[in-house]
């Protein structure tokens, strides 16, 4: 009789960040997050790697922050045209994606000097 160790590992499937946030907060996320909920989610997601998938594209990003503004209020300058565009318009025109949760904050990846804004609903959280 020797020493034995049983190792149990759980493997999780990736899930959309919006699903994770709803389960984490035990709330319906069809309404804007309260300041307290925003803070909880920001703390939980900071430093986590998320992935964005499209038909022939997959990219990983590290979450640095959550935006204070909801996704529907975020704008940025497109480098090619130097035009200011909203994040909602950008995803609708470029990727044909109509965002269902424009009231939620966006994930900020990249740096503060060159932020990359990602709507939560296009990101997968790999537990």
Image (tube, rainbow, N blue to C red):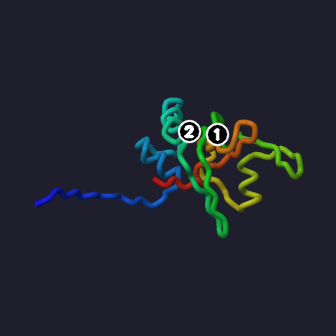
Marks 1/2: CA distance?
8 Å
Query: Residue 28: x, y in percent?
Result: 46, 45
Residue position marked by numbered label 2 in the rendering? 32
- Is residue 123 toward the left or the right of residue 11 in the image? right
Query: Which of the 4 image quadrants contains residue 94?
Result: bottom right
Query: Residue 45: x, y in percent?
Result: 52, 42
> Residue at left 19%, top 58%?
4
Q: Is residue 120 shown above or below 58? A: above
> Residue at left 61%, top 57%?
52
Residue placed most toward the observer, 65 or 25:
65
Q: Residue furthest left?
A: 1
Marking on residue 39: none
Q: Is residue 120 shown above or below 93? A: above
Task: Say few, some or many: other residues with alpha carbon within 10 Å of mark 1 (under 14 / 14 to 19 / 20 or more).
Answer: some
Question: Under tag 1, what secondary structure?
Answer: strand
- Is residue 86 toward the left or the right of residue 62 in the image? right
Asked whether the residues under the numbered discs 1 and 2 touch, taking CB atoms below 8 Å apart as contact, a structural biologist would say yes
Task: Say few, some or many: other residues with alpha carbon within 10 Å of mark 2 (under 14 / 14 to 19 / 20 or more).
Answer: some
> Residue at left 89%, top 50%?
81
Q: Residue furthest top?
A: 35
Quarter of the picture holding the N terminus = bottom left
Question: Under tag 2, what secondary structure?
Answer: loop
Marking on residue 70: 1
Q: Residue furthest right?
A: 81
Residue placed most toward the observer, 70 or 41:
41
Query: Residue 105: x, y in percent?
Result: 61, 41
- Is residue 92 toward the left or the right of residue 15 in the image? right
Query: Residue 58: x, y in percent?
Result: 63, 62
Q: Residue furthest front?
A: 2
Q: Earlier in the sequence, mark 1 or mark 2?
A: 2
Which of pointers 1 and 2 indicates the residue nearer the eye?
Answer: 1
> Residue at left 54%, top 40%?
46
């Amino acid at each position: 009789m020797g020493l034995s160790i049983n190792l149990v590992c759980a493997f999780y499937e990736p899930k959309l960040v919006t699903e994770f946030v709803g389960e984490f907060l035990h709330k319906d996320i069809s309404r804007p997050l309260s300041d307290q909920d925003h803070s909880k989610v920001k703390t939980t997601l900071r430093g986590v790697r998320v992935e964005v998938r499209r038909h022939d594209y997959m990219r990983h990003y590290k979450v640095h922050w959550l935006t204070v503004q909801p996704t529907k209020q975020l704008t940025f300058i497109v480098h090619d045209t130097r035009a200011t565009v909203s994040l909602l318009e950008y995803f609708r025109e470029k990727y044909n994606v109509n965002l269902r949760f424009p009231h939620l904050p966006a994930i900020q990846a990249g740096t503060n000097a060159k932020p990359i804004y990602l709507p939560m609903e296009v990101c997968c959280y790999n537990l």
